[in-house]
Image (spheres, rainbow, N blue to C red):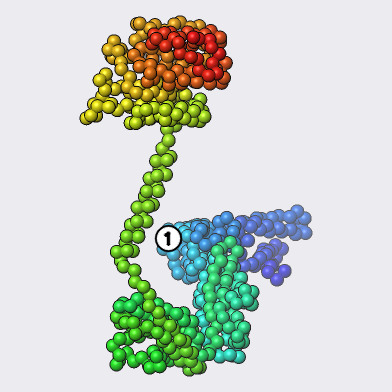
Amino acid sequence: NDNIEYLAESLPDGRRFNARSILKLTPKKEHHNTTFTCQAQNQAERTYRSAKLTLEVKYAPKVTVSVVGGSTRLMEGVDVRLQCTADANPPNVTYRWYINDKLVDTDATTELHLVNVTRAQHDSIVKCEVQNAVGKSEESETLDISYGPRFRKKPESIPADQGSTVTLTCDVDGNPQPDIAWLHEATDRVVGASANLSLVVNQETSGRYYCKASVMGFPEIGAEATVYMKGPPSIISHRTQFGIPGDNVRVECTAYAVPPAIKVLWSFQGEDITTNTNPDYSVLEDPLSEGIKSTLIIRESRQDHFGVYNCTVVNSYGSDVLEITVKPQKNFPLLLILTGVLGGIVVIIAITMFIILCQRKVKKPPGFAPNDQTDVEKQCKESDRSSNISDIKLELRTGSSVSNVHCELDYGGSGGGGGGSETGSESVVTRIGVPLAGPVPLDHRYSNNRFSSGEYPDPVFPPKNEEDLEVEMVLNDIRSYRQLFIDPKLIAESLLLSLDKNFMESKENTHFEKDLEKLYFEERNNFFRDRSMENKEPVQGDTGKYN
């Protein structure tokens, strides 16, 4: 082996020798802590003799840099951690971090933390440098940041002559490379898929183009540009315009013109309008992206100012003329307009209040059927028509059931000054909706307590079903009326008809025991016996169970 050298020296006695074997090598990192063995033997002794040596190699750091998490592509806006590992001997090392060869001012050693990375850091080179007593070494990582499309330069509109070739450019930055599509507005179809779109200008290819760019996982962006075919102007204003006599009238003439218009001329009744010599007129011109807008102002217009005006627009490719008829428009007085507006507001408020009031209905408790309320209201109205008193006031109140519906009647006396009759007037209220007519004189014995339980104690009934509650209410009403001194000619007939009608309806609609029916007619007969009404004929439909 060329790397091994053997040397033998004889000793002075001439019979012994000193032998040396030299191994030559360049130490490397992989030689560190390697054990080398030297073996020797001669003819006198066949047994090998050996010696061992462990080699310690000092070397500069061996560095590796990686992104924590292992992701090779980073999303814009995330936090990134880069890890630097070093193998060195001696192991005492120092770390330095660089981004694009610029030292990062940080105390970071084995890990660098980047917060909210942006597209500006895409393709940045992050380097980690490690140094020990032997030397230094470094390793780097290139950031691959994914971000959405953004225009470096938006496409620009181009005026061109017919037959010429033009190129529209859509310069978009994105990672990964954005997908680009060109759409022609007139035909609504895709006409290109690269950053540059070239076309020959004619009537079909001129117009507006839309460039859209997209990157997977990000919003799409777009921009537009127009290819203008040069030619004479084209006026697009309305042929009929209006103005108010006495006011300043504005007559507009808007023209599409590529290249831009050189001048705009106005004339009226065959005479050119010159603003320098005619104080009745002035002209304002506003350049547009695709032409010009000229406005003729007629100061304090008179009737002779209305008529046909000519607008002429001229550019380097030709001209266009439009006749604009200016007509007088009636001026509505401001007061009339304000009155109409206020009137509309009042109507809206009134409708709103009406809807609110209609919705404020009294809630019906459970068990109160609509038909029951209608029957009671109808009964009250029929009594009102039958009454000979002209100033009856009827109020329908709703309670917890049909029997709690009130018909309240206020009888105005015949005397003057709003006073009552000789006996006074009272408001008679019944729970069953019994309409009464005429004044009701009261016995002074019951003026403080209309329902005296001392003189008319309530009979004791056996437990009743819920179906008999309505009948019980009717009986209570009869007892209450027995405590009144009622003029039979004015009220008895109406009371009799109403009581019997309610009882017969309750009898048809409910099922109650026979003893309750018997009790009803006993109480009825007692009532009319107390009022000397025993000879009254029964109501039609009654079975004649009473006299």
- Crowd rating for badge 1 (residues with CA inside 10 Å; few <14, some 14–19, many 20+): few
Q: Residue at x 48, y 70 (%)?
A: 101
Give the vertical position of 110 relative to 186 (above or below).
above
Q: Is residue 365 visible?
A: no
Name the amino acid type tagged 1: Thr
The residue nearer to you, when weighing 151 against 403, is: 403
Q: In which quarter of the image is residue 272?
A: bottom left
SS for tag 1?
loop
Relative horizontal placement of residue 48, taking residue 278 as reference (left or right): right
How many numbered discs sit on the rendered protein?
1
Give the vertical position of 350 relative to 328 (above or below).
above
Name the residue that disc number 1 marks: 106
Q: Is residue 43 visible?
A: yes
Q: Residue at x 25, y 20 (%)?
A: 422
Q: Which residue lies furthest to the left in this view?
A: 417
Q: At which x and y percent is residue 53?
A: 63, 57
Q: Quadrant of residue 423?
A: top left
The residue nearer to you, when weighing 94 against 8, is: 94
Q: Residue at x 55, y 64 (%)?
A: 219
The residue nearer to you, when weighing 122 against 5, is: 122
Q: At which x and y percent is residue 264?
A: 41, 89
Q: At which x and y percent is residue 165?
A: 59, 88
Q: In which quarter of the image is residue 249?
A: bottom left
Q: At which x and y percent is residue 367?
A: 51, 25
Quarter of the image for the N terminus: give it. Answer: bottom right
Q: Residue at x 47, y 30 (%)?
A: 378
Give the vertical position of 10 relative to 166 (above or below).
above
